[in-house]
Amino acid sequence: MIAAGTALLFTAGAQLTLGYGVKILIDEGFVEADSSRLYEAVVFLLVIGIAMAIGAMTRFYLVSWLGERVSADIRGAVFNNLVHMQPNYFESNHSGEIMSRLTTDTTLLQTLIGSSVSLALRNALTLTGALTLMVVTNLKLSLVIVIAVPVTLLPILIFGRRVRTLSNKSQQTIADVGSHAGEIFQSIKVVQSFNREAAEKTAFGRDVEHAFSVALSRVFQRTLLTGFAIFLLIGGMVSMMWSGGIDVIEGRMTGGELGAFVFYTIMVGTAFATLSEVWGDLQRAAGAAERLMELLTENCEIPDTGTEAPASESALVFEGVHFAYPSRPAHPALSDFTLHITQGESVALVGPSGAGKSTVFELILRFYDPIAGAVRFGSADLRDISLNSWRQKIALVPQQPTLFSGDIFYNIAYGAKESTQATVEAAAQMAHAHEFIQTLPEGYQSHLGAQGVRLSGGQRQRIALARAILSDPELLLLDEATSALDTESEWHVQQALTEIMQERTTIVIAHRLSTVINADRIVVIDAGRVIDNGSHDELMSRCEIYQRLAQLQFLAEHVS
């Protein structure tokens, strides 16, 4: 910033010196017809031009570096803040809109800092210096310009506010367009299978046209802002030149002085025109900055204030937990929920849809905190345990595994901070994934595409299992990892699960009761409460809900 400021002052000073060169060129070169003085004036102007070029290049590079640096830092700061936000934040805020803020809005700020601010400072210095030299050259003519300056400020103040409001709205509409497109592309198979291409094109076109109309309103206001500013300044300059011409004719000033004064006036006019445009950029960037500051100031609803280290090989206990999702506060997901899971035990959670099974996982992972009651590991409340150290003990294998667009090695190694080819391959072998990985053209370096689209469902599930195995968790959460698989894939995944569940506390959400008959304990949940728990045979003999679920499922399997 210091170097850029120095280059800025140097360039502005050199530019102002050009007026003196113009005066010498006219008075001593043209009027006196002195070729030597003309040569000196030309050389002087050439030297000043070279100095201006060097100063401008230096200033441009340094200020552009600042703009890129600030833009990168803001992107990093926003991402670093959002990556710790609770998951439900991204349910109420579309990822496409967030990405628009991270890219488009930060680019606007980069343009402002790396270009517009520099132009504003340079032209502000030029304007101040030119006005000072104008007063020194001719006070009477300067008054004409000075009167025109406040008049020029009026359109800047009037239209500037409108530009800022419309810029903010324009950025929001662009974010909506990006969010809509992202959602459609992520669900392209559903869109095409229901023949919704035409409808989506119409809907997207409507969003684009709305964004265009808002942008056009903003452009129109900026056009009026720039046009009025230039018109008023040109009017002032014409008045000044008429008055100055009379003074030259009547001998009250020389032609060189008038030439220098006109040069300074042009500098003032150019500076004001540029400042009016920069003001429009500033208003537009202010809207982007407001949206970015919203993201920077967002606070996670799950505070990571715990300082205790989690104990090893302890029981996981739900004590009278009451919880309702923020979007449905009047409908409890868990109510007086009490459950004790001993270390090394495998527990299956079964129950009808909406019973609260997934909510148990959400609370274990501390994506949410209970409204009442507590979730404890050993004697410590999860809220008193460091979030990072707690989640290091857990591995989640969801029903629909999430894979990243990197290669297989990256996706498996994602489960551990440090990993080698040998440890990744060992985890893949335990997950019964090594064989099919070896058949791929590039093995562990094979790229999977977005969300792992190049793999089958069973292969994706085994990659997710290998990731969980590599993390060596003390607590394993399985959201029915085989419910959507074919028979062969299910067999492979079940073999992997049998190995990984050894000597680990395992909690399984079971949609298919046949997969959890051999669990140490089956817990039946309904309406957010524990209804009963025991072995399969015990529950079949006494639990009505479990009997109904089993009969319906086994009947469906028999029919199929």
Image (cartoon, rainbow, N blue to C red):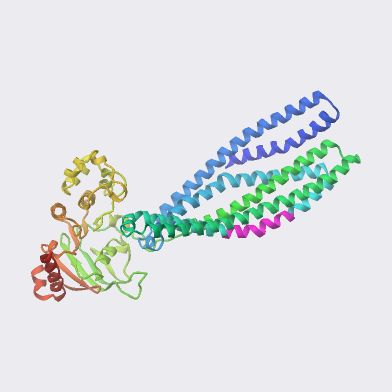
Residue 151, image x and y in percent? 74, 56
Residue 51, image x and y in percent? 66, 32
Looking at the image, residue 373 sits to the left or right of residue 558; the answer is: right
**Magenta span contains residue 478:** no
In the rendered structure, which segment of residues is drawn in magenta? 150-165
Residue 108, image x and y in percent? 53, 50
Q: Quadrant of the C terminus?
A: bottom left
Specify whether residue 50 is in view.
Answer: yes
Quadrant position of residue 122: top right
Q: Quadrant of the N terminus?
A: top right
Q: Please name the residue shown 27% across and 66% down the image.
A: 359
**Magenta span contains residue 156:** yes
Residue 25, image x and y in percent? 79, 31
Q: Is residue 549 above or below residue 410?
A: below
Which residue lies most toward the top here?
36
Q: Please name the residue shown 24% across and 48% down the image.
A: 455
